[in-house]
Amino acid sequence: MLERLGKSVARRPYVVIGAWAVIALVGGIFGGAVFDKTVDIDAAPPGVESMQVDAHLDELNPEGPAVLGVISGEDFYSPALVAAAPVVMERIREMPGVVEVIDAYTAGGLIGDDGRSSLVSVELAGDLENEEALEVADQVAEILRTMPAPLVQVGGELLGEQEFVDRAVREASIGEAGAILVLIILLTVVLGRFRVGGVPILAALVAIASALLLMRVAVTVVSVSEFAINIMTILGLGLAVDYSLLVIARFQEERELDPQANPVSLLGRTMAQAGRAVLVSGIAVCIALGGMLVLGDPMLSGMAIGGSVAVIGATAVGLTFVPAMIAVIHARIPAKGERRWGRRRDLATQRGRGLLGRLTSFAQRRPIYVSAIVTGALLIMAAPLAVLTLGSSDIHSLPAKTEERGAYESITNGFQDLGVEPVIVVVEASVSEPEVRALLDEAASFGTVDEARQVPDLPSSVTVVEFTPLGTSTGVDAQTLVRDIRQIDSPLSFAVGGPAAEVVDSIDHLTQRLPLALLFIVVSTFALLFVLTKSVVVPLKALLLNALTITATLGVLVAVFQWGWASDLLGFDPWGALDVTTPLFIGMLAFGLSMDYQVFLLARINEEWRRRDRTLAPREANRIAVLDGISKTGPVVTLAAVAMGIVFLAFALGSLTAMKEVGIGMVVAILIDVTLIRGLLLPATMTLLGQWNWWRPGKASALRPGQPKMEATR
């Protein structure tokens, strides 16, 4: 089927290219509107206890979003401040969309602990649309900054979230543009011609445009955040480049084997093999992303949908657009040995075996030692995962220099009555009842409680108490307090909410759904690789190797982002935990991309095994198949990994901690996977297993030497 597809595309390349040009144009025009359709995602899955508490509190005491300002750097009683404050606060009160203004000069607000700062809290109308609320918030911020003080910092959840979104979109755009520029230079040098090097980039742009168009439809059905769109574009860019490189390299090889064949025939053969790897790889990555959908977390689901759309676009482009472009420019693709850019080496047919080929040769000479040492090293790298702490990065994801982060830090550290956000307990009974007092007394007795405060001005039939935990709002102490309070044995109906409860509920929800997600990924991936290799052992080993990649990557992330190793070098402030969704997202994305390279190599190794010399002993035939398969595909995998690493550096070099976690995590995963796993552990273990790599029930006879014949590959 794929061979026929390749020939059909080669016969009508301009029709295929024209169709994709139309799709890209429509995607560019209408797909860009997807950014206007993104929404803020709840901090916890819908329906969990903390979300129910939030909804109940909104019913009891509806409040709109708040803009918080800290006026500091000058004595509170400065004549200039005292004179200006009433005028400024009155201007804000008169603004449409402002419900209430509480400040220390005119409305009994808070004065800072140092006596040189004060807090202004501006509540906005709750019925404002997000864009309207942001417009009002920006106007409030501008007016507050007219206060005659050395420092006025304006923040709050609304402005903090918007700053995160703006930075994420801006930095992703800059990073992607930089990555494309670097990739153009790299691919032009490696592939030897600007026109050839431009094909993967053009394919990536077409894939992203088509993905945006698909996403424009998807957002009408599901809710996604701007972060999901960033993931979609970055993944579409990386995968489209990977798939393009594989197809181009295989075309070079097929042409070298049969120089007299016409382009139609060559592209048919190319797509029969490389197209199969592209298709299986795309399905494998979608399976990993599908696991995130099974988890049922709103943030992860949005990113899974965005990523899946990108994979679909990249796979479709790799199977149609790229061979069409090759059919048009095939004469420009350098042949083996042709001098270009001062080099004589060719991507698909190098005189040497390439980096992975040399590593494979080394691993095959010492398979036991290599397997033991590499596995031990990976387990050591994974060790920090044993002390993983999960939390909510919230405002900590913003750089310390941002105004919104500065306002948060000033409020948290400078006002004794504020600081850590509380654990909220809602009891459906009056505080005058003995059972209520007993419940609250027991909750207040826990060692993780710093102080407690009853929320006033609520109906007498409901009691709401805020327990301020020790440590941070979502730290270990706060999470422990949530769990302890929920374990209290009481005849009353009560619920626990607040930021720490949202983290606890997210962890519990994800933990409960994780086995189902893993089962889906393992079974689906095993079935896919079994179809690809016709082996039971190879898929099992592939799953184990991917598990090593993931655990080692997450262990490095704990050391870097939780412990703070190299934080100064990488430009972020560690806050002692990872965001609750980060390990699962990076783990499953790393699984998908690892499977991407796994499929590239296993497809070629399996091909070499099927065409083996049947007169050789099976163990020797297996060794040769592994060495030849990795040597022939290794240069493509290495270049693809470098290209993907460059793409994810767009995240790693950004200023947002959450995006740094993704970028650095994926760069680490790619580095580990391509060197330690694919270069050493894969060939070492396949060499140790010998012909048993290809065992499946009922096929034992295939493992014995047969008659001297060669299997045809075409």
Image: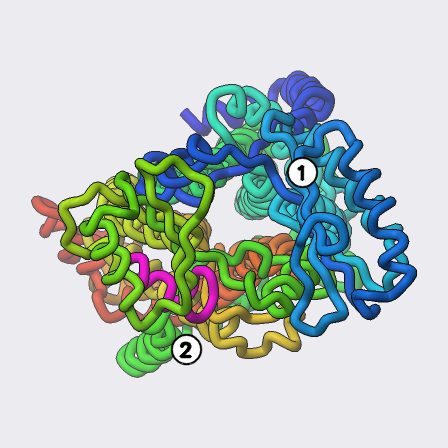
Residue found 56% across the figure and 27% down from its top? 215
Amino acid type, residue under disc 1 in the picture: Glu
Of the two numbered discs 2 and 1 on the same chain, state the one appearing first in sequence. Answer: 1
State whether residue 534 appears in this view: no
The residue at the far front in this view is 432
Task: Give percent across and percent down for residue 521.
Answer: 29, 44
- What is the magenta range? 470-483
User: Quick one: label 1, few (<14), some, or many (20+) residues within 10 Å?
Assistant: some
Q: Is residue 472 in the magenta section?
A: yes
Q: Which residue is mark 1?
A: 100
Query: Which one is in front, 526 or 435?
Result: 435
Amino acid type, residue under disc 2 in the picture: Phe
Task: Give percent across and percent down for residue 117.
Answer: 74, 65
Label 2 close to label 1 by CB (< 8 Å):
no
Residue 20 as seen in the image, left or right of residue 683: right
State whether residue 249 appears in this view: yes
What is the quadrant of residue 11 in the picture? top right
Mark identifier at residue 362: 2
User: Quick one: label 2, few (<14), some, or many (20+) residues within 10 Å?
Assistant: some
Residue 549 as seen in the image, left or right of residue 159: left
Residue found 22% across the figure and 47% down from its top? 433
What is the quadrant of residue 627 in the picture? bottom left
